[in-house]
Structures are given as C-alpha cells and as structure tokens.
Image (spheres, rainbow, N blue to C red):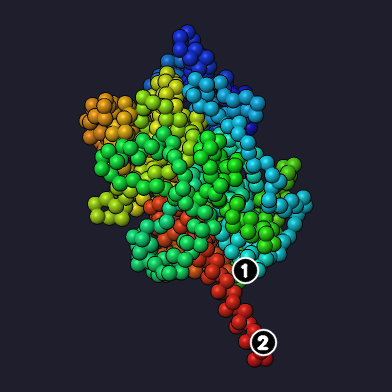
Amino acid sequence: MILSAAHHSTLQALADTFIPGFAGRPEQPEFWARSGSEGIDLQKVAEVLSAQPLGAQQEFEKLLGLLANPMLGLTWFGPLKPFVRLEPEQRQQMLRSWAQSNLPQLRKGFHALRKLLVFLYYGSSGAEQGNGAWAAMGYPGPLPDAVVDTPKPIRTLQPTTDTTYDCDVLVIGSGAGGGVVAGEMAAAGYDVLVVEKGPYCHGCDFTQREVDMLGKLYDAKGALTTQNGGVALLAGSCLGGGTTVNWAGSFRTPDYVLEEWAREHQVPHFTSQEFRYSLDAVAQALSVNTSYTRHNGQNQALWDGSTKLGQEVKLIPRNEKGLTDSDQHFQGLGYTTMGDRYGIKQGTLNTYLLQAFQHGARILADTRIDRVTVQAGVATGAEGVHTTADGRPVQISVRAKRVVVAGGAIQTPALLLRSGLRHPHLGQHLHLHPTVAVSGVYPHRIDPWHGPSMSVVNDSFTRLNGTNFGAKLETPPAHAGLMAMVLPWLSGEQHKQMMLDAAHLGSFIVLTRDRDGGRVSIDKHGAALIDYVLSDFDRASMLRGVRAAAEIHVAAGASKVYLPHGTLPTLHAANGTLLNPEVLDQLPYLGWKPNQFSLYSAHQMSTCRMGGDAATHPLKPSGETYEVRNLFVADGSAFPACSGVNPMLTIMALAHHTAQEMKAGSATVSLTTNRMATSR
C-alpha cells in the first residue's frame, strides 16, 4: 500500500496523539518528551498494511480518508475539522469517543490505529541502535550474547525461473503438522517436497528486534486479525511455522478431551494405544522435559500466588535441549517468540525438518501455494509463486502422488476453498483459545522479557460447572511492542506512565477453551476472511479466569492489577489484601462487544475437523479429505474441536499418526498392485 502525503500527515498526527511528547518532566525527561512521530517509521506502516488482504487495505485507506475529512466531527460531536487541524486535547477526546462508541466501525478503527502505532513506536529498533524509549522502561532490547552462527543445516531450493517439480508427497506448510509428516515420510523412503510460504531463518537471522521479527516470521506481518478487528491473531509463517516462534510449552492432550473427540466425533484412534505412541514419539523427538532450573518473575508470581490460595500449579514441559543455568540461556529464552538465536528450542527446524532433509526431502521456502490441483476427484499437485532472493516472482508447479496441506487453521481452509472444495463444514468451527491478559504492578522488578515465557500453569479452572470448558492460567512473552499493544489506552499520559512501569509489570494470560466457534471463508481474491465473536458462554469462562488471575496477582504481592477491558478497571491491594473488590464484582456487567476489550489468539484450530460423519466433518479419521482422494490435512485445523491446551504437541502427534496411516495406505496400494500384476 502506498501512503500519500496526506496519509503521512494524518498518521504523524495520530502517532503524536497516541504517544504525545511532554516537555519539562523532571524524571525521565527524554522518555516523556519523545513523541510518536519521532519513533515511528511510516514505511513500516506501509509494509504492514501491504501484507493485509486487499479488502483490509481499502478499508484502512477509507479510515484515513475519514480522518482527513472535516465531516470527521460528526463521528464525535466535535468541530467540523480534519484530525490534523484539531487541538491536541481535542484529538484525544476524539479517540476516546471512538473507543467507547456504540458504532462497531469506530471502535474497530480506534483499535486498529492504536495497536499499529504503539506497537511500532515501542517495538521498533535499528541494527545499530535501540529504541529511545527503552532505557527509561528498563527494557534491554536484543541481547549481546553469542548466537548460533554455523552455516544453515538445511539447504533450500532456490529456483530463479518458472519450475515444475515431481514428488511422491507434497507437504504444504512446515510447522508442527507439516514438519512431522515430512520427516516421517522422508525417513520411510518417500520422495518428499516441502513448500513453505515464509522464509528460512537460522541462528543469527533471529535478530530479537521485535517489529522486524514479527514482520518476517508471522502471517500478515503479525497483524492478522478477525474481520471485525476484535481478535488479534498470531500465526507463524516461516520455516518451522509455529514451532519456530511459539513459547515452547509442550502439553499433552488431556484425556477428557481425547475421550470427547473419540466419542462425539467418531474418531476412536484418539483413545488408542497407537495415538499414545505418537504422543510419546514426538515428545521424545522434541526432547520435552521439565529440567529448567528457574522461573522468571511472572511465572514465579503465578506459582507463589496460586500456592498461597491453595491452588495447584504445575511445571510446564518444554521442548528444549542443551539448556544451561547460565544467564545467557535464561535471559535468551524470553526472546524465542521472535525465533531462537541459540538453537535450544527443539521445533521442527531442529528435528523433523532436519530429519526430512537428511533423508533427501527437498524444501522450498518463500513460496505461496495458490491452489491444489485436482483431476477426477484426485489430488495431483499444486501451483504457486516463489519469491526469489532479489524479489522476483516465479511460477511453481508441483506434480505429486499425494498432497498434505498443513498451513494452519486459517490458511489451510482458505487454500482448500480456493482449490474448489465445497464441504459445508470446511472453514467452520474455528476455535481460537481466546485470550486476555491480566497485569499486575509489583514493588520489585519482574523483568518479564527474560526467562522461559511460560514455565508454570494453573489448571484449577479448566473444567467449570461440570463441563469440559474453562480457562488455563499461564504467562505470555512480554516485550516492549507487544506490551504496549496489550495495555489499554485512555490517554497518552496514562499509557506512557504504564510503559514506564514495564519492568515491574507481570502478566498472566487467561486462555479459554472455547465451546462456540467462528469461521474462515475467502474473499473474491481468495484471501482468508476470519469471523469470530466471543459467545456469552465462553465469555463467562474467560471472566472466571480473569477473576482468578487477579486474585493470584494480589496474593503474590501486586499493588495494582489492571483488568482486561478498554475502560481500564484497576484493582488496588496492600499486603496481599484486595482493597476494592467491588471492581471485580462489576466486571461481568461491563460491555463485552468486539473492541470494547482486547482479545488475542495464538492457537487456531478445527476449521477442517476430522470425524466419522462425512456430512459434518471435511476429513476422514485418517486425515484424508472426504471430497478429494490423496489430499490430506495435518495441522490444528484437523482437530475435531478445541484442544484446551497449547496445541503444538497434539498437532505433532496427530500429524505423526496421519503419516503412519499414509504409509499403511501406500503399502496396501502397493500390495494390491503387485497382486494384480501377478494375476495377469
């Protein structure tokens, strides 16, 4: 998207309103004086916008057009002036009016601008210098430690002209699902080609610079969102997918979830010994363990507060290898949501994809697949576009005996829909583990950016009111840009003051197992459209988790707790005692429509769910689609329903099981062919 001079003026005025400069402050004068336009490169804004679907780009352009129009005053009963001609206080009044508006389009516009500009301001940094706001916040930015600087162990294909490939198995996507299928099938002797939309990064490629890494490693440059803007989604889009950028939590699927899937969706293998073998196999391959020696400040607070309240907490198994007790390793673990510079995290990059490559698999990164090719109801390959090192597009065609789609629960159904599949449940039943953050201000430093992002979990609220639905309490990675985006904005001064407290801020996330889902469809250009609104049932589960998280913060010694709503309801505490409990009691009665609060998702599931009923499930229990033979799905979209835990290990186990089914299917076909040949 190309920004005009008028766009630049409007965006600079918006940046200076969300992050105003205040002269003459005696403490941290440089932090207070620095304004948004001084710290935001508008070229970054253009890059983020250009990564969005065309419809979203056009909508953002209309938003900027409204802000440049004198009729803007009608949206907030203010003077009939464009945004740039308003006085500074009027600009803040206008933004607050939009944030609290009954019109969903205005709330969406406010949050789109807020998230984008504060993230870019606090998260941006150059290779040679940090960010002018960081020193006052106590945020260190990228660490100076040694990194893995060995040559890349995987050599990817680098086509420079239009190319056609032939293979036994085409795997589209390289994350938890695609990586495992590729490794298993290649090790079994099949000719495997892996195609990945994102880039291949290794060691020092992971710069720990937040804006650059989210832009490089995540779908839509980290700005993926639902159509109503109410849920921000993080989805890995790089070689290794989510396993390259996730938080290393390696949860086994709860038995009650597996039993539910087996019973309600007619997929008996979820309770079989074979599936348990797959879980064991991937856990071993990933070196899953609980041998880390210390928690960071957030996880220690979750542990301490929970135990003081008599609630059980557990260590989270993590997929790490070679971890030491050194400060370098401990601090570095907090940055792995931007990729692991140290080679400690055992995602598919260091395990199954490497195994696949070592067994002859070819790997093609930086390649977007536009459609799967189908003839007479049988998958025959795929077509797409590879971006060369110098930025040129070249056409890619693949002829394959079997195709495995593993692009994640957003992009997989979009690809299948672009390819002509029309199952009525394809793209439906989207589950997101909708998540909110509850933050506490502590008298001592928390330094939430260091240490394992998640090492402690409280499962006391996962099965509420006799159901299989509820919420888990965990901790998130916390870096300057994402922290600024999550914290509510009521005024420029209030938000800056909260950011000054960053080193003392600890956050818990309430990860909700959502019963009711959304959907993924495609627009006229074939881009994914995501629709999701939190249901009343799931909001009740979430709010029970919010109350629990707040009470744990207080028990752990927080002096203030910020509740996850746009009006910033705040709890005050002293000596472990809550001073204004009525604020918690009133929480359910606030407005909970989209963009009245900030909702996030790092887990997308179930849009191509497998099951025994062909009328209501796009996939067979084997992972093959009911509509098209030799077309398989192996990612979180295949889950019959929401997993209720961080899904990496479950996706990998399901992909491992699907790979065994594919091997067995090949053996059966081969045996039948040989018998027919013999009989002739």
- Nearer the observer: mark 1 or 2; the answer is 1
Visible residue check, residue 188:
yes
Disc ID at residue 188 = 1
Q: Amino acid at mark 2?
A: Ala
Comparing 379 with 661, the one in front is 661
Is residue 636 positioned above or below 455 on the image?
Answer: below
Disc ID at residue 97 = none
Comparing 431 with 134, the one in front is 134
Q: Amino acid at mark 1?
A: Ala
Percent position of residue 417, x then y? 54, 57
* Residue drawn at (42%, 20%) of the image: 497
* Residue drawn at (47%, 40%) of the image: 452
In the structure shown, which secondary structural element does the residue marked by tag 1 occupy? loop
Is residue 368 positioned above or below 113 on the image?
Answer: below
Visible residue check, residue 637:
no
Is residue 470 positioned above or below 266 on the image?
Answer: above
Label 2 Cα neighbours within 10 Å, binned few <14 / some 14-19 / many ≥20:
few
Residue 239 as seen in the image, left or right of residue 101: right
Percent position of residue 506, x then y? 40, 32
Residue 581 as seen in the image, left or right of residue 488: left
Judging by the rendered image, the residue that carries numbered circle 2 is: 677
Residue 582 as seen in the image, left or right of residue 517: left
- Location of the C terminus by quadrant is bottom right
- Location of the N terminus by quadrant is top right
* Residue drawn at (47%, 8%) of the image: 24
Looking at the image, the residue that sits furthest to the right is: 161
